[in-house]
Amino acid sequence: MPVVAALAVAVLFTGGCSGTQGTSLSGDPSESATPASGSPSPSPTPSLTPPYPTGASGCHDNKGWTAQESRDWVRLVVDTPKENYEDDQVKVDSLPGYNGPLCHEIIVQVEFWKLVYGVADGAGERLSDGTKPVYYFDIRRVKRVELRADASSERKIALPKSLYAADRSVCEGALLSITVGKPLTSKELPEEIEVGGDESLWAGATVDFRSKRVADYELSQPSAPRVCSPDGKPTADPADVPTPGSQPTDLYPTDLYPTPDPSFDIDDVLRSPTP
């Protein structure tokens, strides 16, 4: 199995801070039994109790919700492309009577980020754990959609075609973030991202955003960062370069086949204009 590598981000944005944290929700639906009457009678029929029941006004009162409460609700109604079985889109479900509708709409940001990976040249500072960087990546927002969600209607957001193209560069990855409130700032973006981690539906690769407003995210990793130059360009055919960890490490010259150690943010690698 490939060894997991942590990557650092060359941040391109300025300003901003993370949202506040409030109390958490109980969230999960519970089951209750309908008492049997008369004799004989069928077995009790279980019924679901909505986690966000509607009141007399026909909506669930979410006035005064904290950022955390809003984030927890958004997690229930939004499906990322891997979770959306219908097609490769971000889907916002319509769930009247179960998770809403809410009485007050919640502002949700759906943002798509392009990641360009490069191999470190051996320079740069060490991480807090004492290891040196090997991979770097640059992050740039390519699409942002602002929604006002209350579960009263279904919405679908198409993926940026070039970002998710089957023939995209082997040095490029994509990151989707779903955030409550304002768009993410540079201070809320991740500093390190795993490479080679599990990207399955149930255990996606870890991305540590520096914000508690992020309700969900999905990472599409580069297919072969091991062949990428410091400026994010392929330097070899991935078919001719073994995946790190698949063979003895002495087969990987440092200049072409780096071992997947953690990497660190540097200012002079892969800079691009702020979108």
Image: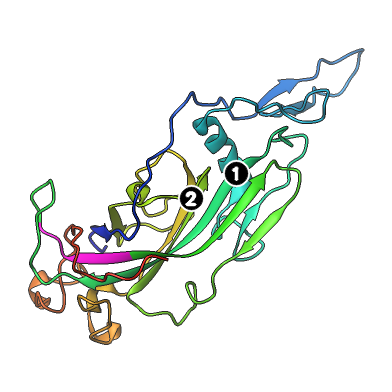
- What residue is rendered at 75% in x and 20% in y? 33
Answer above or below: position of 89 versus 73: below
Q: Residues within 10 Å of mark 1 (few under 14, many from 20)?
A: some
- What residue is rendered at 56% in x and 67% in y? 159
Amino acid type at circle 1 is Ile
Per the image, the residue denoted by label 2 is: 183
Answer above or below: position of 57 versus 182: above
Q: Which mark is residue 107?
A: 1
- What residue is rendered at 34% in x and 44% in y? 210
Magenta highlight on residue 134: yes
Answer with left or right where residue 44 lies relative to residue 138.
Answer: right
Q: Earlier in the sequence, mark 2 or mark 1?
A: 1
* Viewer-proximal residue among 10 and 176: 10
Return the x and y of residue 37 as percentages of the image width and height. 89, 13
Q: Is residue 78 visible?
A: yes
Answer with left or right where residue 273 lies relative to residue 261.
Answer: right
Q: Residues within 10 Å of mark 2 (few under 14, many from 20)?
A: many
Question: Quarter holding the N terminus?
Answer: bottom left
- What residue is rendered at 81% in x and 15% in y? 35
Answer above or below: position of 162 versus 261: below
Magenta highlight on residue 63: no
Q: Secondary structure at mark 1?
A: strand
Q: What stretch of residues is rendered in magenta?
A: 132-138
Amino acid type at circle 2 is Pro
Q: Quadrant of residue 232?
A: bottom left
* Viewer-proximal residue among 12 and 152: 12
Return the x and y of residue 22 as percentages of the image width and height. 47, 26
* Viewer-proximal residue among 104 and 137: 104
Q: Secondary structure at mark 2?
A: loop
Answer with left or right where residue 178 lies relative to residue 78.
Answer: left
Q: Quadrant of residue 4?
A: bottom left
